[in-house]
Image (tube, grey):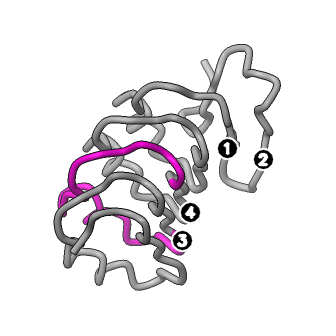
């Protein structure tokens, strides 16, 4: 089986771009129309993940909190709803760029964001956050 840090998408659509980094392979896809599967949280060595500009919906799965090696996460320009739970972001201590703008997220911004000491970019605009 492949190492656990590969995100494998069988037969990616034509709009998929493969982006490589030293620690992981990341797929930028722009034709997804569903929710994020909780199994994505099993890819614990992932460092970069961009699922921006799709039609992804539902709540952000708590299994994403297992991705504690993430440096960049782009989930912007989707249809995510619900809150950004403290337990979701508390393990993201290596995060440098968190892009959640242009969704339908609501509630308060968790104070755990302050624990992201490497954070350079945090974009939460165009949501319903307080």
User: Marks 1 and 4, Cα distance to the nearest angstrom?
Assistant: 11 Å
Mark number for residue 19? 2
Instruction: Point out the tag, 1 or 4, that comes first from the N-terminus.
Output: 1
Give the class, few, some or many, for how many residues have Cα within 10 Å of label 2's Cα (few <14, many ≥20): few
Q: Are marks 4 and 3 in contact (CB under 8 Å)?
A: yes
Indicate which disc residue 97 carries. Answer: 3
The CA distance from mark 2 to mark 3 is: 16 Å
Query: Circle 4 sits in a helix, a strand or a loop, which is it?
Result: strand
Quadrant housing residue 35: top left
SS at mark 1? strand
Q: Which of marks 4 and 3 is nearer the N terminus?
A: 4
Kindly identify which residue carries mark 4.
Answer: 72
Asked whether the residues under the numbered discs 1 and 4 touch, taking CB atoms below 8 Å apart as contact, a structural biologist would say no
Q: Residue 11: say if magenta.
A: no
Taking the spot 53% from the left edge, 74% from the top edge, the residue there is: 96
Q: What element carries label 2?
A: strand
**Can you identify the residue that label 1 sits on?**
26
Question: Cα distance, mark 2 to mark 4?
Answer: 13 Å
Residue located 29% across and 46% down the image = 81
């Amino acid at each position: 089986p492949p190492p656990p840090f590969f995100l494998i998408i069988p037969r990616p659509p034509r709009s998929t771009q493969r982006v490589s980094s030293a620690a992981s392979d990341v797929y930028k896809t722009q034709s997804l129309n569903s929710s994020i599967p909780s199994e994505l949280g099993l890819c614990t060595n992932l460092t970069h993940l961009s699922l921006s500009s799709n039609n992804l919906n539902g709540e952000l799965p708590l299994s994403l909190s297992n991705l504690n090696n993430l440096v960049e996460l782009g989930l912007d320009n989707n249809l995510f709803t619900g809150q950004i739970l403290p337990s979701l972001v508390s393990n993201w201590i290596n995060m440098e760029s968190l892009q959640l703008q242009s969704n339908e997220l609501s509630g308060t911004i968790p104070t755990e964001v302050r624990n992201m000491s490497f954070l350079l970019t945090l974009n939460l605009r165009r949501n319903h956050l307080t």
